[in-house]
Structure formats: C-alpha cells, structure tokens
C-alpha cells in the first residue's frame, strides 16, 4: 500500500517536471494544482521515534501496522529531521537492510550516511542498519536480532 503510494507520487512528480521542462503546450491550472498537491504529499514525510526496543523484523511489522514503514532516509534534509528527533547517544533502527542494501519500503534511494569504518559486518551477521541519533546521525550495520528503538515514517494521507 505505502509502496504503491510512494511510487505513484514519484511518477507523477517526474511527469510534472518533464512536462514543465519539455512541453511547449500549457498545462491547465487544474492539472498543475493536482500535481502540486501530489508533490507536496510526497515531500511531507514525518519521522516518528518509537523508544520501546524491538528487533529489526519486529520494528518493520510495527511501523507497517501503525505508520507507513521503517524510515527511509533519502537525503541530508531527511537525515537532519532524524537527527533532531531524540537526545544524543541513542541508536535506532532505520529501514535499510542488507540484500545489496535495500530499503524496507522498496524505495531506491542510494543516499548513505555510514559512520567511519561502517558497514563492517562485524561477526558476519550485521545485516540491518541503525542511525546514531542526536550525535551526528551516522549509520552502523548491526545484528538484526538486537533490540533497539525504532524510526518509522508516516506519509500524510492524500
Ligand atoms: Ca558494524
């Protein structure tokens, strides 16, 4: 459901800018308003910190049930939102996991913010990713079975 919503918004956004840049024809006002609305929905990502520790898989289920999904951090602006969320020193699960590094919600962002020396797959089982919140927001690969606070995200219903 959430994946479909994100993909639909991304497609509409892309079409919108393609038409603006390449088309000689004028888009009608209604079309522009609809596309602008969809674009704003796509931009309006809210991150939510859940402080109850859970494993990565439990965290994914929780976020999908109560929000949209585990957090996808797609750029430095979103990373700043994540860093502002909680006091220094905590780490929380985000949506990135190792399968050639994918995001839980299927988004294809290649943005990465690894801490120095990470990912190191220490012990050979570090397949999920935590963000070090409130410090510099950098990321570590960690065992998925470890219990951590969670970062979910929610999209405004459009
Ligand atoms: Ca590591």
Image (cartoon, rainbow, N blue to C red):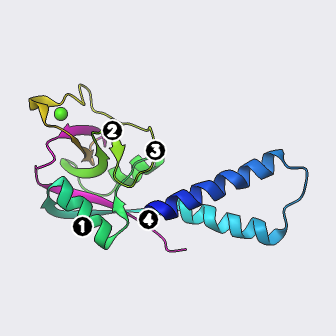
Alpha carbon distance from label 3 to label 4: 14 Å
Taking the image as shown, residue 109 lies to the left or right of residue 48, namely: right
Alpha carbon distance from label 1 to label 3: 22 Å
Residue sitting nearer the eye, 53 or 88: 53
Say which residue appears at 55% left-offset and 74% top-offset: 158
Q: Earlier in the sequence, mark 1 or mark 4?
A: 4
- Quadrant of the rendered image containing residue 46: bottom left
- Quadrant of the rendered image containing residue 26: bottom right
Alpha carbon distance from label 2 to label 3: 10 Å
Farthest top residue in view: 117
Residue 76 rendering spot, x and y as whole percentages: 45, 43
Crowding at dot 3, Cα within 10 Å, few <14 / some 14-19 / many 20+, comes out as few
Residue that carries the numbered disc 3 in the rendered image = 108
Q: Earlier in the sequence, mark 2 or mark 3?
A: 2
Alpha carbon distance from label 1 to label 2: 21 Å
Q: Earlier in the sequence, mark 1 or mark 3?
A: 1
Alpha carbon distance from label 1 to label 4: 14 Å
Residue that carries the numbered disc 4 in the rendered image = 2
Q: Is residue 86 placed above or below 119 in the rendered structure?
A: below
Residue 150 rendering spot, x and y as whole percentages: 23, 58
Residue that carries the numbered disc 1 in the rendered image = 62
Residue sitting nearer the eye, 92 or 55: 55
Alpha carbon distance from label 2 to label 4: 20 Å
* Disc 3 secondary structure class: loop
Q: Which span of residues is magenta-colored?
A: 136-158
Q: Earlier in the sequence, mark 2 or mark 4?
A: 4
């Amino acid at each position: 459901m959430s994946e479909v919503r994100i993909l639909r918004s991304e497609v509409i956004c892309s079409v919108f800018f393609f038409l603006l840049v390449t088309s000689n024809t004028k888009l009608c006002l209604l079309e522009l308003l609809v596309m602008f609305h969809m674009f704003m929905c796509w931009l309006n990502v809210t991150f939510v910190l859940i402080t109850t520790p859970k494993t990565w898989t439990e965290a994914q289920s929780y976020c999908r049930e109560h929000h949209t999904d585990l957090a996808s951090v797609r750029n430095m602006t979103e990373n700043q939102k994540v860093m502002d969320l909680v006091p220094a020193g905590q780490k929380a699960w985000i949506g990135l996991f190792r399968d050639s590094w994918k995001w839980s919600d299927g988004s294809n962002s290649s943005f990465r913010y690894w801490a120095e020396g990470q990912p190191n797959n220490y012990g050979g089982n570090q397949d999920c990713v935590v963000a070090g919140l409130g410090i510099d927001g950098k990321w570590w690969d960690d065992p998925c079975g470890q219990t951590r606070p969670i970062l979910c995200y929610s999209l405004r219903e459009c």
